[in-house]
Amino acid sequence: MIKLFQYTLLILSLALATSHSHADREINDRAALADLNVGKAVFLIDIADAKKMNFYLEVIQGTFKGMQAQGVTPDFVMVYIGPSVQYLSTSPKEEVADRHGAVLMEIESNVEKLAALGIEQEICAVATEAFGIDNNTLLPDLNLVGDGFISLIGYQAQGYHLVPVY
């Protein structure tokens, strides 16, 4: 019993010592951002789940602000394809609105916040057609493009780095 207690105490002490040393470290992305002035990224947004999509829209805002805080100018483009497009309409299909109502409002708000940061947001016309979305009802901060894949190819050719989000 005493040995078990001593062993448990030793394990807890090691765990606390290890976690404490990590807590003291400065958290940053210095190694990845070394000598980088501008961070060019094209985010491919292909998410079928509305809550998950909203979560990532918030994460991308944090990524933008995190780069700024570390002295790198973010140059971000987002390209929405696939099922993501069904959450980006001012008049979503009834089944989508019934199932995801409150989250759709959050998504719309986050699209506006991303635009306010200066992030270009494109939505794929191939996807809007495939999912039966009327292009006249797209959220106002979105730029309709013919084909999201073409956008991705073009932005990567211009030096943007692909960040797939799905």
Image (cartoon, rainbow, N blue to C red):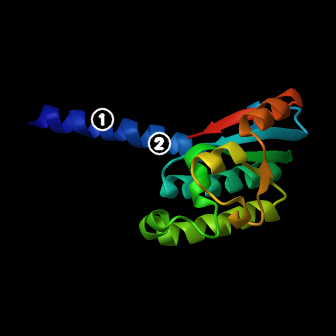
- Badge 1 vs badge 2, beta-carbon distance below 8 Å: no
Q: Residue type at mark 1?
A: Leu
Q: Residue type at mark 2?
A: Ser
Q: Reply above or below: 30 against 55.
A: above
Query: In the image, residue 44 lies at what x, y percent?
Result: 67, 40
Which quadrant of the structure image shows residue 136?
bottom right
Q: Which residue is mark 2?
A: 19
Q: CA distance from mark 1 to mark 2?
A: 14 Å
Query: In the image, residue 82 lies at what x, y percent?
Result: 59, 43
Which quadrant of the structure image shows residue 163?
top right
Query: In the image, residue 156 lies at what x, y percent?
Result: 81, 30
Q: Report whether 51 appears left or right of 115.
A: left
Q: At 52% from the left edge and 64% from the top edge, which residue is drawn?
A: 93
User: Which quadrant holds the C terminus?
Assistant: top right
Q: At 87% from the left edge and 35% from the top edge, which residue is drawn?
A: 36
- Counting other residues with Cα less than 10 Å from the Cα at mark 1, is it few (<14), some (14-19), or many (20 or more)? few
Q: At 44% from the left edge and 64% from the top edge, which residue is drawn?
A: 95
Query: In the image, residue 111 lies at what x, y percent?
Result: 70, 62
Q: Which residue is mark 1?
A: 10
